[in-house]
Image: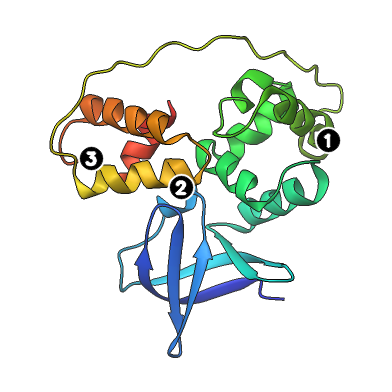
Amino acid sequence: MITSLQGVLAAATPLTAVIEINGIAYEANIPVTTAEKLPAVGATVKLHTVVIYREDAQTLYGFASTADRDFFRLMIEHVTGVGPKMALSIMSKLSLSSLEAAISQGDVALLARCPGIGKKTAERLVVELRSKVGSASATVVPATAGASSLPTTVVSGDTTRAADAVKALIALGYRAPDADEAVRRASLSLGPGASTEELIKKAFA
């Protein structure tokens, strides 16, 4: 069982990190909240890891802290219908403290805003995890229906960072048109020079 990796950060995107150790490069899938904490490429980094074994694949997931890793494992092992991809999506949208608070307080509406997470899955997160992260007497608060429409202004000259942000959102469960529109809105709000991680966080808002 590989529980952590420490080595040189060889490459990184908002959803992956490649760590080189003694000439061997390990690629780990990571949430955006971990990508934000990575050092510059070439620096030493440590990730706390979970390895998922399938019949046709072996996938490595990395996190900035043991608490993040343990919460990821808690979701995929105890919540029906939540696999590694969905768990990464949830942890990319909300910090660990926000997730624990939302589950403890039964805030289904907040949890349902995570990409690819519907009301039923959000309710399962509360019901199946609240006794493990907070008060067992938490009341499930129904998610409100309806969503505000997004602006349709188009920003010309998309940068590589914006394109990378769109790809990351699609990988996290957004439909391509929604991802593109959310990143364009984020770019308008943040202005030129925004990093890929900043665009993704703004697109989540």
Q: Residues within 10 Å of mark 3 (few under 14, many from 20)?
A: some
Which label's residue is closer to the chain start, 3 or 2?
A: 2
Q: Which residue is mark 2?
A: 32
Q: Element type at marker 2? A: helix
Classify 85 as above or below 99.
below
Residue type, mark 1 in image: Glu
Toward the viewer: 117 or 37? 117
Q: CA distance from mark 1 to mark 3?
A: 38 Å
Q: Is residue 197 visible?
A: no
Q: Which residue is painted at 59% across and 32% down in the image?
A: 98
Quarter assignment of residue 103: top right
Q: Is residue 132 left or right of residue 190?
A: right
Q: Which residue is mark 1?
A: 128
Quadrant of the image containing the N terminus: bottom right
Quarter assignment of residue 157: top left
Q: Residue 194: which numbered mark, if any?
A: 3
Are the residues tagged 1 and 3 within 8 Å (C-beta)? Answer: no
Are the residues tagged 2 and 1 within 8 Å (C-beta)? Answer: no
Residue type, mark 3 in image: Ala
Which residue is most to the bottom? 22
